[in-house]
Amino acid sequence: MKKIRVAIIGQGRSGRDIHANSLSQMKEQYEIVAVADMLEERLERAKKELNCEVYRDYRDLFKRNDIDLIVNASPSHFHFTISKEIMESGFHVLSEKPLARTVHEVDILMDTAKKTGKLLAIFQQSRYAPAYRQVQEIIKSGVIGRVVQVSIAYNNFARRWDWQTLKANDGGNLLNTGPHPVDQALQFFGSEEMPHITSMMDRANTAGDAEDYVKIILHGHGRPVIDIEISSCCAYPSFTYNVQGTRGGIKGSTTHLDWKYFKQEEAGELKLVTTPMVNEKNEPAYCREQLKWYEESWDIPAEQGKDVFPSMAQNFYNMIYNTIVHGKELEITPSQVRQQIAVMEECHRQNSL
C-alpha cells in the first residue's frame, strides 16, 4: 500500500492535536516525515512524539524531494500566502480553515493550483460529522417532506482572549468556527448558486476586536431558509440542528438526534374551508386534527462517540488519500469553499464592529 509522505507547517492546537495526531493513527496510508514551527519547544516535542525531521523555517521543507503533501496549519492569517507558496514550490497542499479572507484570494489559489498542477485541498472535516451526515440521510429519505428551514447553532458561553480574537489575525467566531456550520449550511441550501445573505454580529465576551456572536440568514427562491448561529454568549444552548419540514422535523445535537413525521397517505389531503369553523357543538373553533406521528431517534455509534473529532479527521484523510493515490475527485472542492468564503466576506461587509 502506497504511503503519502506528509510535512506539517505548525504544531499548535491544529497542527499537533488534530493533524499530527490523526495521521499518526493512519500509518498504513501516511507517514509524517517533517514538521515546521517557529517555537523551539514545539520542535523538540515533535522530535520525540513523531520521530521526524524538524525545521524552524517552513521554506526549508521546499528543499526536500520526499514530500507528497504539505499540511498548512499555520495561523489563520498566513493560510493564503503559505498555501500559494507551497503550490508554487511544487507540492500538494492541504490548508486549514479558513482557506482565505476573500474570494479574490481564493481565486488566486485556485488559479495557482491550475497553473502548477498541484492539489489544493481544504480541511473541512465537519462534512464528515456523524450527526450532520445522519441529518442529511433523514432529509434525503423524504420522511419529513420538503425542508422549509434548517437551523444550525454552534453555541456556548465562553470568554476568550487569545490571538484568534483579533481581526488582524483573521480571528473571530465567523472565520474561526464559522467554516464548519457555514460549509454544512451551504450543503443544505445547495452549492450551485449563491444565497441571499443577512448577517448580524456583536462583540460580547471577547478581549479582542473581532466578533464572538454571529447570526446569518441564507435564503433564496425555492430553497430552504438557513439560520446559522455561532454564539459565545449562549448560556442555554438547546440544539445543534433543528430542521423544519412540511411533514415533520429533526432536532438534536452532535451525538443524539430525534425526528418525527406523519404519513401523507394516512393524514389525507387538506381541503380548504372558507366558512366559519365550528366544533361538534356548533361552537366557534380552530382547525384541529389528530395526526399519527412516527418518532425515531439516533445516537452516535459508541466507537465514534469516544473520538468524534479524530474520526472526522480520519474520514477526511481517507478522502484525501483516495484523491492523491487513486485519482478520485475531491469530495470537498475549492469551488465549494469559495462559496463559503463569499458568504463570510459578505457577512463582514454588512458588519463593521
Image: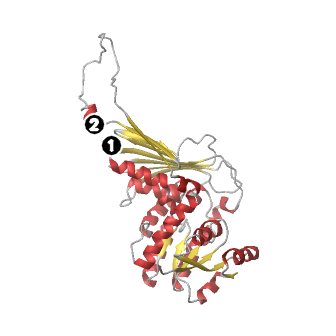
Residue 110, position as x, y percentages in the image? 45, 75
Per the image, the residue denoted by label 1 is: 145
What is the image's colouring? secondary structure
Residue 45 is drawn in which quadrant? Answer: bottom right
In this view, the residue in front, 292 or 76, is 292
**Real-space CA distance between mark 2 and mark 1, rounded to the nearest whole angstrom:** 9 Å
Helix, strand or loop status at disc 2: helix
User: To which quarter of the image does residue 59 belong?
Assistant: bottom right
Q: Which residue type does callout 1 highlight?
A: Gly
Residue at figure coordinates x 61%, y 76% from the top left:
8
The residue carrying pointer 1 sits among few (fewer than 14), some (14 to 19) or many (20 or more) residues within 10 Å by Cα, namely some
The quadrant holding residue 326 is bottom left
Report how many numbered discs are placed on residues in the image: 2
Residue 286 image offset from top left, x and y in percent? 35, 20
Disc on the earlier residue, 2 or 1: 1
Look at 25% across and 31% down and name the residue there: 270
The x, y position of residue 275, in whole percent, is 25, 19
Does 61 appear above or below 149?
below
Left/right of residue 336 with respect to residue 99 in the rendered view: left
C-beta proximity under 8 Å, tags 2 and 1: yes
Residue that numbered label 2 is attached to: 264
Q: Residue at x 55, y 53 (%)?
A: 305
> Tag 1, which secondary structure?
loop
Location of residue 219 with respect to 92 vertically, above or below = above
